[in-house]
Amino acid sequence: MIVDGIPSTDVVQPHDVAELAAALSAASTARHAAVITGGSSKLSWGRTPGRVDVVVSTGHLNRLVAHRYGDLTATIESGARLTDVNRQLATHGQWLPVDSAFPAATIGGMVATNDSGPLRHRFGTPRDLLIGVTLVLADGRIVKAGGTVVKNVAGYDLGRLVSGSFGSLAAIATATFKLSPLPPASGTVGVFYRERGAVARDAQLLASNQFEFTALDVQVTPGAGGPEYRLLVRVASSPVATEAQLAAVQRLVSADSHLISGSAEDDLWRDQLTAPWVGNGTTIRMAWLPDSLADVLTLLERVGQETGAAVTFTGRAAVGAGLVRVDGPVDAAVTFVDRLRAGDTVANVVVLRASPAVKARVDVWGAPGDSLPVMQAIKTSLDPAGILNAGRGPI
């Protein structure tokens, strides 16, 4: 198996938690650099490893262990694909309300990267829905944190700690989540703008109202006459509530809008999810203060003009988080990352996907800041041999 261009010496595919523990214990004893993967959709994320001795695949750990539909919770093995899990949960009218651009995305990978999409507006990230985990530490110890009901928060912070750690601290064996009922109706309002200030004003106006949006997303794409801006507003509730809120949105926005539903709506949001990953451009994740969206759009347009790069941006307008895809030569991508990190308009600028040439010139994670000693202490405590994630980061 290839990890960001680096071939692994060995691949291990455990069939249960005990085999997963044995695999990590053996790697720790031998000081073998280990990478944990599920659907292999994010093996190019993070720093390029110097070497990979073993890839531990959780593909056989793919069961829905328990669905407590009366409590709206489920325990799932880490190698289960999100699409398969939601297909099973739907038989009881429930779902795990997170989304990913990658069809092969697994539960463990979603938690390990804290990957999220437009549904974050209403439901948060996988970290926010996680109520319990079973982890395998680098030395083979199996530990549990949290519980199977929402009220049980024993060890809750350990689950939150591994969320977004990119497999640097422990292997996720199972995860328990709080679920949501499947909504009976859904609809989306799409609004097209030529001026960035208008889309930012409308996004702030809608976010400040008492709507229960499923998603409130902004999109920027290259156009013949300059950047094109769209606001996408999704409501999923009862048929009456959905219709009423969509109508209210159309009355409030300052530009022409149109309603989208059915398969066209599904296609629209699939395109919104996958837009940052089309082609081979550099994909960057970043955050900002929600009320500074206009400044963010201005920054992206200015840096795009300075570098000559084509810029595609998708973001959670009311949350202040999103992805930007930069299509252009290596120099343009490197300059783009440097410009984003140089100011204070955006923060937490992380390069998720990039060519080896770009990674050779920028640290994908950026400066660690004051938290570095704490992060290193946690890493040393949970993975004293330093084998996990083969130095890909962030810890």
Image (spheres, grey):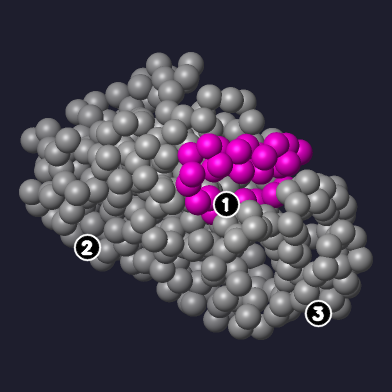
Decide which of 259, 339 is in the foreground and name it.
339
Q: Position of residue 318 (x, y in %)?
A: 72, 48
**Mark before the other along the chain sequence, 2 or 1:** 2
**72 or 111: which is nearer to us?**
111
User: At label 3, which amino acid type do we have?
Assistant: Pro
Is residue 49 part of the magenta span, yes or no?
no
Q: Position of residue 112 (x, y in %)?
A: 41, 47
| Label 2 environment density (alpha carbons within 10 Å; few <14, some 14–19, many ≥20) | some
Q: Is residue 312 magenta?
A: yes
The quarter of the rendered structure image containing the N terminus is bottom left
Under mark 2, the amino acid is His
Residue at x 74%, y 64% (from the top left corner)? 192
The residue singled out by tag 3 in the image is 239
Over which residues does the magenta segment extend? 290-318
Horizontally, is 26 left or right of 347 in the view?
left
Task: Indicate the secondary structure of the residue bearing disc 3.
Answer: helix
Q: As displayed, is residue 62 above or below residue 380? A: below
Residue type for callout 1: Phe
Upstream in sequence: badge 3 or badge 2: 2
* Callout 3 crowding tier (Cα within 10 Å): few <14, some 14–19, many ≥20: some
Residue occupied by mark 2: 15
Residue 341 shown left or right of residue 203 in the figure:
left
Badge 1, how many Cα within 10 Å: few under 14, some, many 20+?
many
Q: Which residue was labeled with disc 1?
A: 313
Q: Earlier in the sequence, mark 3 or mark 1?
A: 3
Magenta stretch, main secondary structure, is helix
Disc 1 element: strand
SS at mark 2 in the image: loop
| Mark 3 or 2: the one toward you | 3
Q: Nearer the viewer, mark 3 or mark 1?
A: 1
Q: Tell me what residue is drawn at x 69 percent, y 60 percent.
A: 230
Report x, y in % for residue 53. 12, 43
